[in-house]
């Protein structure tokens, strides 16, 4: 069994093979909520976490030739009173196999010529410039040595080692449990918030955090819905996109859609099965070498076919996808990288998601694709097709005109009890195909109904 | 019944009577968690909330002569897809009784000479300087017109109107329910996290947020303990400091300490009753005109008396308090202001907590007092005495020497099953005395045991 320190040392060695200069990565600091002592929960920079392994606040690591030097802020004299005894600098160094450890103030003597990546919190970002005595561009558009470093880190973080996968499996297991709790809580729920509470309770009780703001809504067509105050009524579909993150930052990202009553209506069932067919087809196609963009197009094709079969779209599925007609109902990408971030490395813009030389399409049906690379063994991606009736899309006069001959609006009106459906799993690309990390949570309609019914 | 808009208009009129110049208050923006699209939940500036009433992100209000002009960022073309249909600017203006409303970009034409208060998020703080074309000092040390504005806002926010109290009562009710859930969950809990999950579930299900990072721990002597991974064992005391905040930002702040087994040991019972006696004595003393510092000293005196009675301290309680011997076991202040912030207006440093001309004491037993003002009707304060055995204090050689003749260390050792006890309620100062907003949650030992036992 590989220990954490073995893993961390190997990651540092791998980085040393790609970057031949000193590197300094900061963890970042707390963000104030409404006054300085009332902060949001601390989240360390993912790049720091990848090499340091622990969410230390206000710390930095220097990496060079496979060696790690840790720099941590000195505890204030009163911190033992308010925050308890902290591990000493040397204890921290031993935990993460640092080769040396110093107070943060010593960083100035060892920072000359270092490459870095800008962190998210603005105050630490200012510190980065101050310590390095140069401007640091946004992490989306790094320059010079920082760009070289970014490209090297992307190369490492694109695929996951065993330690990373072990953490992601833990996050997935708790996420599965949270969704089961949400389904079980539905029959007694009045508001969306009741179901969210049941789900997040599981995550909190497992001493994890939410990897992102939960979506728990009967208005699934609002893709990033952040409200939880709507009543849940028999006849509604409930869409829950909720994922756990382990204490060292590894994420899960899962969506299920279930009927509040415990029973899909015939129209809900039909559209659910269209989305599920896309989900299953995409996962079946995953293996090393396959272009993720083609997985996305397979989802589009499968959804178009399903909507033709239901009489909602008219024409040949391939033609419909070519003209982006599927995007009327499935306007986002089929998924994204998953790792230390729920959209892994999205702090780097498209530097991680897009193969060098590729850029986002302007096409309606492709512009929201977050990942455009050939799959490699060890990558983890989400597969999350959906069907939505978004008023801002379907009532857009331009769309109505463009797609007037391929949509049967009268037939669509019969499916008015479906506002949004998404089915999302976390999938590891293996040597021979795919492993669904979240497979313990059913996707099949009958199994879902069984979990919801009291 | 007073409507929200009546309340907001009255607050604006009151401010106009105190400040005779234009005022611009910003709400602030989202703070990024690990990448720009993955943010912490938005929390608007409390000063903005007080006058605007709604947590609008990236907005500003201009106040002058009792009139309010609202400035809100224009929704991006894709925001309807991701975030759903938003209320229009005019709808928002009507909801909060704004006299006019413009896109945020128009602010530049109406900002000349305005006073402001610096917000918490650094990016918006930069924006404030940019818009006003001058340096804006930290909210703790405002200068010139900003100081005048700050003093006026403190004067208004120190006491609460009916609308504010209605919100705080809602927060208190949910907080009480959360504590009851935590007690009920204890007999089946393995880790502190299980109890935290049960408590925060209640807050989430009521569509509220936590007003601060919950403390749920068997190591209550760590005053701001942010770990939840310790096992809870029969024989331990569990200290839970958890409070809800309503959607418009009004807070509650409650602590209870209960035995994991459902039954206090004799030593736990004795010390619990000392803390409870201090809690009850302080609340009984609250009425307009009383100095909060004297409430704090009453808590110190009551605790010193109790510890003398138990044989832990030796001497006259008044003498012991005079020499800060109580602070060995009760090192923090007895409470603080409560309102839109859990430590209300602590973004202003001590400008709200301390009467003009008063400053923090350097004394061991008074330095952590957050409030030093005469009480006024309409103030809400917490009352939260405690008893802790903090190693960093009790093993400090200086303290051991200073207090060698007044502590019976052998007797103290018999109370080793008490690491930390705190009992905290939210108290409204009324015309004639006090009203405990959180009175529905028992403090009495037998009632607590009853709620914990399965």
Image (tube, coloured by chain):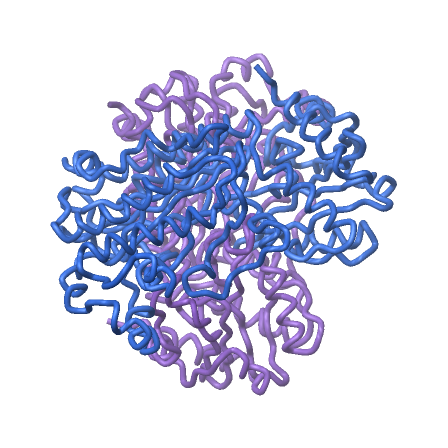
Chain colours: A purple, B blue
- For the N terminus of chain A, the quadrant is bottom left
Q: What residue appears at the point 56 percent right and 84 percent down from the top-left corner?
A: A20
Q: What residue appears at the point 59 percent right and 17 percent down from the top-left corner?
A: B2
Using the rendered image of the protein, determine whether residue A320 is visible from the camera's viewpoint: no
- Of A372 and A121, nearer the camera is A121
- For the C terminus of chain A, the quadrant is top left
- Above or below, B23 against B235 in this view is above
- Of B82 and B133, nearer the camera is B133
- Above or below, B189 against A188 in this view is below
Q: Looking at the rendering, which quadrant does residue B75 occupy?
A: top right
- Of B179 and A419, nearer the camera is B179
Q: Where's residue A273, x and y in %?
A: 40, 28
Count of number-bearing discs: 0
Q: Where's residue A93, x and y in %?
A: 38, 79
Q: In this view, does B397 lie to the left or right of A24?
A: left
- Above or below, B123 against A356 in this view is above
Q: In this view, does B423 lie to the left or right of B371?
A: left
Q: Where's residue A304, x and y in %?
A: 53, 31
Q: Looking at the rendering, which quadrant does residue B97 occupy?
A: top right
Q: What residue appears at the point 19 percent right and 49 percent down from the top-left corner?
A: B190
Q: Is residue B179 left or right of residue B204?
A: left
Q: What residue appears at the point 35 percent right and 65 percent down from the top-left corner?
A: A84
Q: Where's residue A49, x and y in %?
A: 45, 66
Using the rendered image of the protein, determine whether residue B48 is visible from the camera's viewpoint: yes
């Amino acid at each position: 069994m590989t220990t954490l320190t073995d893993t961390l040392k190997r990651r540092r060695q791998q980085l040393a093979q790609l970057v031949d200069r000193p590197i300094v990565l900061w963890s970042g600091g707390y963000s104030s909520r409404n006054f300085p002592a009332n902060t949001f929960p601390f989240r360390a920079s993912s790049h720091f976490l990848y090499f340091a392994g622990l969410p230390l606040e206000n710390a930095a690591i220097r990496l060079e030739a496979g060696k790690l030097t840790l720099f941590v802020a000195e505890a204030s004299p009163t911190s033992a009173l308010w925050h308890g005894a902290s591990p000493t600098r040397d204890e921290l160094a031993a935990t993460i196999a640092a080769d040396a450890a110093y107070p943060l103030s010593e960083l100035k003597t060892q920072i000359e010529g270092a490459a870095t990546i800008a962190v998210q919190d603005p105050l630490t970002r200012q510190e980065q410039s101050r310590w390095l005595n140069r401007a640091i561009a946004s992490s989306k558009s790094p320059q010079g040595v920082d760009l070289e470093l970014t490209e090297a880190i992307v190369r490492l973080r694109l695929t996951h080692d065993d330690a990373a996968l072990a953490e992601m499996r833990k996050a997935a297991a708790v996420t599965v449990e949270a969704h089961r709790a949400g389904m079980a809580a539905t029959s007694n729920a009045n508001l969306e918030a009741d179901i969210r509470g049941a789900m997040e309770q599981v995550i909190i009780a497992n001493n994890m955090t939410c990897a992102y703001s939960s979506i728990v809504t009967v208005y699934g067509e609002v893709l990033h819905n952040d409200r939880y105050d709507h009543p849940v009524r028999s006849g509604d579909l409930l869409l829950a996109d909720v994922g756990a993150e382990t204490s060292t930052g590894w994420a899960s990202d899962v969506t299920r859609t279930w009927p509040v009553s415990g029973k899909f209506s015939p129209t809900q069932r039909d559209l659910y099965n269209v989305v599920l067919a896309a989900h299953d087809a995409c996962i079946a196609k995953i293996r090393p070498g396959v272009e993720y963009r083609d997985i996305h197009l397979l989802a589009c094709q499968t959804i178009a076919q399903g909507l033709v079969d239901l009489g909602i779209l008219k024409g040949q599925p391939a033609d419909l996808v070519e003209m982006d007609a599927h995007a009327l109902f499935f306007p986002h990408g089929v998924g994204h990288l998953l790792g230390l971030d729920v959209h892994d490395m999205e702090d780097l813009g498209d530097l991680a998601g897009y193969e060098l030389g590729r850029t986002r399409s302007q096409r309606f049906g492709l512009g929201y694709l977050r990942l455009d690379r050939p799959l490699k063994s060890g990558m983890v991606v989400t597969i999350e097709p959906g069907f939505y009736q978004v008023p801002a899309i379907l009532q857009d006069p331009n769309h109505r005109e463009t797609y007037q001959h391929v949509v049967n609006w009268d037939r669509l009106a019969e499916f008015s009890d479906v506002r949004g459906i998404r089915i999302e799993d976390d999938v590891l690309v293996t040597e021979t195909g795919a492993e669904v990390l979240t497979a313990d949570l059913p996707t099949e309609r009958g199994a879902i109904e069984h979990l919801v019914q009291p």
